[in-house]
């Protein structure tokens, strides 16, 4: 009986040691969160509000990492600080009346933190699907790793909710607007372009649809579930990568 107790005690201490090692290993990683700042994405619907709720929940979830949020909402020093598309030159790389865009401000702020992982949170629109999508950048050397990360995050979200998993897509496949990556020449998401965003691991998550998922997304309880699911899987991915 005594030997059995000692065996259980040793096993418990080993598990605790592994958990502590995992937490210490990931706590050194810098993570940047970029919630959408778009408030022009539907009548009586603020994508900025829903996405910020998800990000705040993720950042509040244990364990605590070196996490930062980049958000231009309401900042009048920048153009399109509360609207605009991530794939349009006018809304991203353009300088208007001497002002850079809200997106440009957010990426400059992120780069100063030198994060290992950058996660952008958005809601989709016009899909008629209550679903979740992952987007990664085409053509840089981290494409494969980013595909794995995005795939794991959207699977975690889908498992924790009733959102359909629509898979991981390349930003070059959207056919939207006119912003292009200087390296590939292909249509791209400004926030994922390796020439703009210096984080090696960069993903953009389209969570729900602003019409099909409207009530679901506006529910703070659902935002919390999604944020916590993202954080939990991010921690697991960081631990596996190390």
Image (spheres, rainbow, N blue to C red):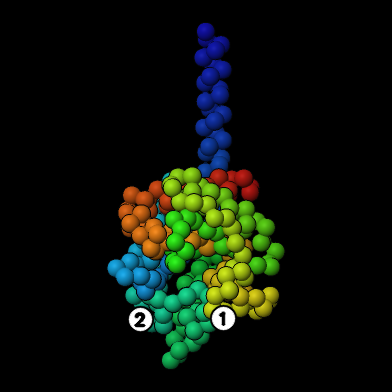
Rendered location of residue 142, percent (x, y): 66, 61
Left or right: where 237 falls relative to 47: right
Near-viewer residue (102 or 158): 158
The residue carrying pointer 2 sits among few (fewer than 14), some (14 to 19) or many (20 or more) residues within 10 Å by Cα, namely few
**Direction from residue 84 to residue 215 in the image, left or right:** left
Is residue 57 placed above or below 41 in the rendered structure? Answer: above
Mark 2 in CB contact with mark 1 (< 8 angstroms): no
Q: Which residue, as the protein is rendered here, is positioned at the far top? A: 1
Q: Which residue is mark 2?
A: 76
Label 1: how many Cα within 10 Å (few below 14, some 14–19, many 20+): some
* Residue drawn at point x = 61 percent, y = 69 percent: 173
* Residue 133, position as x, y percentages in the image: 52, 58
Query: Considering only vertical position in the picture, is 84 above or below 141?
Result: below
Indicate which disc, 2 or 1, sits on the residue closer to the N terminus: 2
**Relative to residue 204, is residue 233 depicted above or below?**
above
- Secondary element under disc 2, as helix, strand or loop, is loop
Q: Residue 190: give x, y in percent of width and height.
A: 55, 74
What residue is shown at x 61% (from left), y 75% (from top)? 187
| Residue tagged 1 | 178
Picture residue at 44% right of the left edge, 66% below the top: 125
Q: Residue furthest bottom?
A: 97
């Amino acid at each position: 009986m005594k030997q059995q107790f000692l065996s259980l005690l040793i096993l418990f201490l080993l598990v605790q040691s592994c958990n502590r090692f995992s937490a210490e290993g990931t706590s050194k990683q810098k993570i940047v969160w970029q919630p959408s700042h778009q408030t022009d994405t539907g009548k009586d619907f603020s994508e900025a509000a829903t996405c910020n709720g998800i990000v705040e929940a993720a950042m509040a979830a244990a364990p605590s990492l070196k996490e930062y949020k980049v958000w231009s909402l309401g900042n009048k020093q920048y153009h399109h600080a509360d609207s605009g598309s991530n794939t349009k030159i006018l809304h991203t790389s353009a300088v208007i009346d001497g002002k850079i865009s809200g997106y440009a401000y957010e990426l400059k702020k992120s780069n100063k933190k030198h994060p290992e992982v950058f996660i952008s949170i958005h809601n989709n629109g016009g899909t008629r699907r209550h679903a979740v999508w992952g987007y990664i950048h085409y053509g840089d050397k981290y494409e494969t790793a980013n595909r794995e990360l995005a795939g794991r995050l959207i699977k975690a979200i889908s498992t924790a909710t009733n959102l359909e998993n629509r898979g991981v897509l390349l930003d070059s496949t959207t056919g939207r607007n006119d912003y292009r990556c200087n390296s590939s020449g292909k249509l791209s998401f400004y926030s994922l372009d390796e020439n703009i965003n210096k984080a090696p691991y960069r993903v953009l998550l389209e969570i729900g649809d602003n019409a099909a998922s409207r009530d679901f997304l506006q529910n703070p309880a659902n935002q919390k579930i999604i944020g916590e699911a993202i954080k939990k899987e991010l921690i697991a991915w960081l631990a596996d990568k190390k």
